[in-house]
Amino acid sequence: MASQPRPSDLRRAKFVRRLPAALSELAGPKHGPVRLPLHLAWSGLTTFDLDRPRLRMSYYRIVLAEGQHDDLVQYLDQDLLVGLWPTLRTLVSRDVREVWESAFGELTDSARAAA
């Protein structure tokens, strides 16, 4: 009898399918207001000023948790993600954190450097 996959394995697989091939694919905005579509920001605030640190962090949390591959590429920026990662990794789910750090060593390096 085949064993059932654990729920955490299913969640991680979902996040793995969404990943870009490389962080360099992330070509999203770096500054100013950005309006997220309702399939990402479906509750509460939908426009985020990336020049405001708290809003930028919320924006990144939402996109990482809810975004599909095309959303990640469109709305995230490589440099911002790496810079935010030491704090951001503590604000996202364990599944998101482990999937992104397993795929992109530069995120793990960023977290270690900040520690």
Image (spheres, helix red, strand yellow):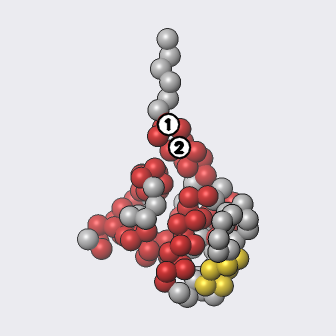
Q: Position of residue 6 (x, y in %)?
A: 47, 32
Q: Is residue 60 left or right of residue 73?
A: left
Residue 80: x and y, percent?
Answer: 50, 76
Q: Report the residue marked by disc 2.
A: 11
Q: Are marks 2 and 1 in contact (CB under 8 Å)?
A: yes
What mark, if any, has residue 62 been given in the picture? none
* Label disc, if present, on residue 7 of the rendered structure: 1
Residue reaching furthest to the left: 115
Front residue of 36/43: it is 43
The residue at the point 61 percent across, 52 percent down is 18
Label 2 neighbourhood size at 10 Å, few (<14), some (14-19), many (20+)?
A: few
Q: Quadrant of the C terminus?
A: bottom left
- The three-letter code of the residue at mark 2 reads Arg
Dividing the picture into quadrants, the one containing residue 66 is bottom right
What residue is drawn where x is 69% and y is 63%?
A: 42
Name the spot of residue 106 as percent of width and height, x first: 40, 64
- In the displayed structure image, the side of residue 105 where residue 81 appears, left or right: right
Please state which amino acid type lies under the numbered disc 1: Pro
Q: What residue appears at the point 47 percent right and 40 percent down from the top-left corner?
A: 8
